[in-house]
Image (tube, rainbow, N blue to C red):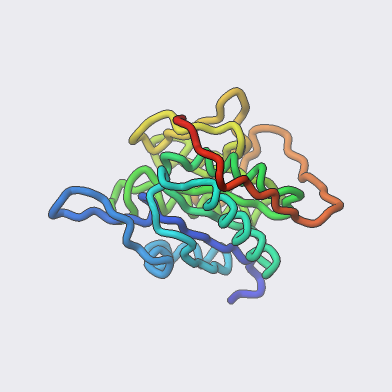
Amino acid sequence: QNKNLKTISILHTGGTIASKVSYSTGAASSSFSPEDILKLFPELKEIANIKSRLMRNMFSEDIRFSHYNLMAKEIEKEIQNGADGIIVTQGTDTLAVTSAALAFALENLTKPVLLVGAQRSSDRPSSDAAMNLICASHFITKTNFNEVAVCMHGKSGDDYCYILPGTKTRKLHSSRRDAFKAVNSNTIAKVNKEGKVEFLQEYHKKEHKDKLKLKPFNEKLKIGVL
């Protein structure tokens, strides 16, 4: 632990970002542990003190309201334990839905919560996982942002990542690394892997007089077809 660095908690739920390719079947399966991900991306430890743990290991399309409630509780726990920011890793198919759900579930949020995924598994040379995680970590440590947002590639190349609004983002392509875009809204900022942050719209930190409050979902509700 470096006292000069902020602390980021990475909470994992599975998905492509935690997957590797099986060359016998050609399919990607989620099999990395939180420790494996830190070994794959040692650059993260130069940016912040990293705490990494597994919440669930599941396909993103299987996530339900009960899982949103679980995520919100675990995020609250990490903030209470002193984390300066939270990264939630997840499969990309419903990542934007989770982002919106957490934006509503976490009231009076005082720390940044970034949803991060990958379009290509972390063991592939073309994976976007490393840059997405690195850019998210830089954004947390270098800004006073305190909302829920998505951090994914801004272009198909490794130029920069976008920070996208939590409730107004969609996945618009099945395989492109820059599949996530803001819809009827603007991109919040862009971040490169060297840590340069450029806000693309005026941002003012939201000030909250009250403490963080969870607004859980009714777990009996059914999720419709998106």
- Up/down of 150 relative to 84, above or below: above
**Residue occupying image coordinates x 38% and y 66%:** 33
Can residue 28 be seen in this snapshot?
yes
Q: Give coordinates of residue 13: x percent, y percent.
A: 45, 56
Quick one: which residue is furthest to the top in this view?
Answer: 184
Between 31 and 73, the one nearer to me in the picture:
73
In this picture, residue 109 sits left or right of residue 14: right
Residue situated in front as seen by the camera: 222 or 15 = 222
**Which residue lies most toward the front here?**
220
38 shown above or below 200: below
Residue placed farthest to the left in the image?
24
Image coordinates of residue 48 in percent, x first then y, are 58, 65
Q: Residue at x 54, y 46 (%)?
A: 65
From where the camera sits, is residue 145 visible? no
| Residue 159, horizontal then vertical, whole percent | 45, 40
* Residue at 59% across, 53% down: 69
Q: Nearer the viewer, residue 132 or 46?
A: 132
Which quadrant holds residue 7? bottom right
* Quadrant of image for the N terminus: bottom right
Among the 4 quarters of the image, the one containing residue 19: bottom left
